[in-house]
Structures are given as C-alpha cells and as structure tokens.
Image (spheres, grey):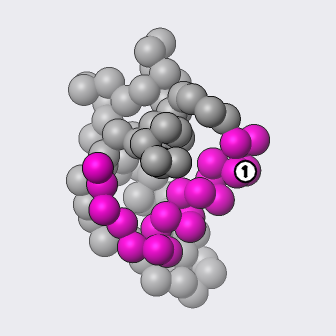
C-alpha cells in the first residue's frame, strides 16, 4: 500500500478517468514489449517524465516537482 495525500490521489484518479476507467492494466503504460517499465528503462522514463512535467510547470508558472523514486502503480491498486 502506498499512502498519498488527497491531491496526489485526485491527480491519479483523474488520469484513470481520462483513460476511460479501465479495470486493469498500468496507469502509466510503457512502450516496452511487456507494457510496463523494465528495469533497464524505468529510471530513464521517470527522469524524462519529471523533466517534461517541470518544463510544462515552468511555462505555466506552476510549482515544479521535486525528484522522487517511481513506484509501480496499477489500476487495481489505485482504486483499492
């Protein structure tokens, strides 16, 4: 179980709803053959996602994200 503040839960739930409320699968699918972050690419993909999110935040004048370790988030875990 991953504890999270309400704002994080709301953002993740919005992502789930925007993808059509799937009942299974990955919340942040990867282009890998397996459909999830591989051990060789997870750090690179996470780093790029943070970079792009912060670039957008900067353009919008919003607060940038601090670096954090990625967790595996699947749809069932988000909804439980």
The span picked out in magenta is 1-21
Say above or below: 15 vs 57.
Answer: above
Name of the residue lying farthest toward the top: 33
Say above or below: 27 vs 67.
Answer: above
Residue 35 lies, in percent from the top left, at: 49, 21
The answer to which of 7 and 67 lies nearer the viewer is 7
Residue at which label 1 appears = 18
Within 10 Å of disc 1 (Cα), the crowding (few <14, some 14-19, many 20+) is few
Secondary structure found at label 1: helix
Residue 42 lies, in percent from the top left, at: 31, 35
| Residue beneath the point at 54% across and 84% down | 62
Name of the residue lying farthest toward the front: 80
| Residue beneath the point at 30% across and 54% down | 2
Name of the residue lying farthest toward the bottom: 61
Q: Is residue 49 magenta?
A: no
Our reading of the magenta stretch's main secondary structure is helix
Q: Is residue 16 magenta?
A: yes
Say above or below: 42 vs 36.
Answer: below
The reply to whether residue 44 is in sight is no
Q: Is residue 14 left or right of residue 1?
A: right
Residue 67 lies, in percent from the top left, at: 27, 64
Q: Is residue 76 left or right of residue 50?
A: right
The reply to whether residue 48 is in sight is yes
Residue 71 lies, in percent from the top left, at: 30, 46
């Amino acid at each position: 179980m991953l504890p999270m503040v309400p704002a994080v839960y709301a953002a993740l739930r919005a992502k789930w709803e925007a993808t059509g409320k799937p009942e299974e699968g990955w919340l942040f699918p990867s282009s890998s053959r397996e459909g999830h972050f591989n051990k060789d690419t997870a750090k690179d993909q996470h780093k790029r996602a943070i970079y792009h999110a912060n670039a957008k935040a900067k353009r919008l004048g919003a607060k940038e994200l601090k670096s954090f370790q990625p967790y595996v988030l699947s749809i069932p875990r988000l909804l439980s």
